[in-house]
Image: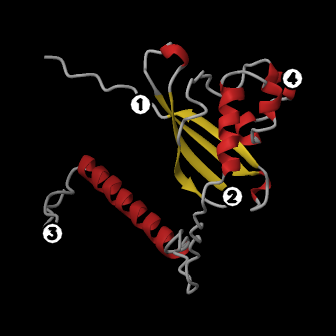
Amino acid sequence: MTDSTGILGGWLNSPRKQRRFLIVSAAIFAIGVVAFVSVFVLRGTSNAFPDTISNQPAKVAAKEKTVPVTKQQIDLMRTFIKTAVARKKLAYAYTLVDPDLKGTMTLKQWESGNIPVIQYEAENVDTAEFVPVYHYQTQALFNVDLIPVGHTQKRPELLFFIGMKRAGGTKTGKWLIDYWQPRWRPPVPAAPG
């Protein structure tokens, strides 16, 4: 063999080195072809998720007007607690409840007493104060602090949320109870030691 001179010097003298050089150069060429095809042939969009910026002003939800609490609403809440919550006169209680609370239950299912209303017999239903959390023309939420009958519960009192809304969402619809849950949080365990 002749003595190679130049940039590669004696690097290509053996067939094994020539084969390796061929494989490395073929791999580099293949990477170049893939890069060329992806950049120039298969362009696509530069941004697959373009921003949709609008010149229109944002639509801001109108703040609802607070209205005074009526005697009719207080009477409805007291009646609901005396009937559905105490599990008495359930057929009448069925007419006081919005479908959001009773779901798809029929009157017959409701009268069985297995209803989505937490049972709690309170002795202060007629004197309990209903404190509004919010009160608008079509919906309202109140806090009510109830004392159990004969102090049969472990807690001497329990605070409940009671919500109502107008049937059909109109300003003149009948008020119906749509929410009843205790405002209770489990106690945080004390750190040992």
Kind of residue indicated by mark 1:
Arg
Lower position in the chain sequence, tag 2 or tag 3: 3
* Residue in the image at 29% along x and 50% along y: 20
72 relative to 116, above or below: below
Per the model, the C-alpha gap separating discs 1 and 2 is 29 Å
Element under label 2? Answer: loop
Lower position in the chain sequence, tag 1 or tag 4: 4
Per the model, the C-alpha gap separating discs 3 and 4 is 96 Å
Q: Position of residue 73 (x, y in %)?
A: 67, 48
Seen from the viewer's position, the closer of residues 162 and 123 is 123
Q: Which residue is mark 2?
A: 138
Q: Position of residue 191 (x, y in %)?
A: 20, 22
Kind of residue indicated by mark 4:
Lys
Q: Is residue 116 something one can see in this rendering?
A: no
Seen from the viewer's position, the closer of residues 191 and 36 is 191
Q: Residues within 10 Å of mark 2 (few under 14, many from 20)?
A: many
* Residue in the image at 72% along x and 41% along y: 100
Per the model, the C-alpha gap separating discs 1 and 3 is 80 Å
Q: Which residue is mark 1?
A: 185
Lower position in the chain sequence, tag 1 or tag 2: 2
Apparent side of residue 50 relative to residue 179 in the rendered image (left or right): left
Seen from the viewer's position, the closer of residues 71 and 29 is 71
Proximity of marks 4 and 2: CB atoms separated by less than 8 Å: no
Q: Is residue 139 something one can see in this rendering?
A: yes
Q: Which residue is mark 3?
A: 7
Proximity of marks 3 and 4: CB atoms separated by less than 8 Å: no
Q: Which residue is mark 4?
A: 108
Q: Position of residue 18 (x, y in %)?
A: 27, 54
41 relative to 150, above or below: below
Apparent side of residue 109 relative to residue 140 in the rendered image (left or right): right
Kind of residue indicated by mark 2:
Thr
Closer to viewer: mark 3 or mark 4: 4
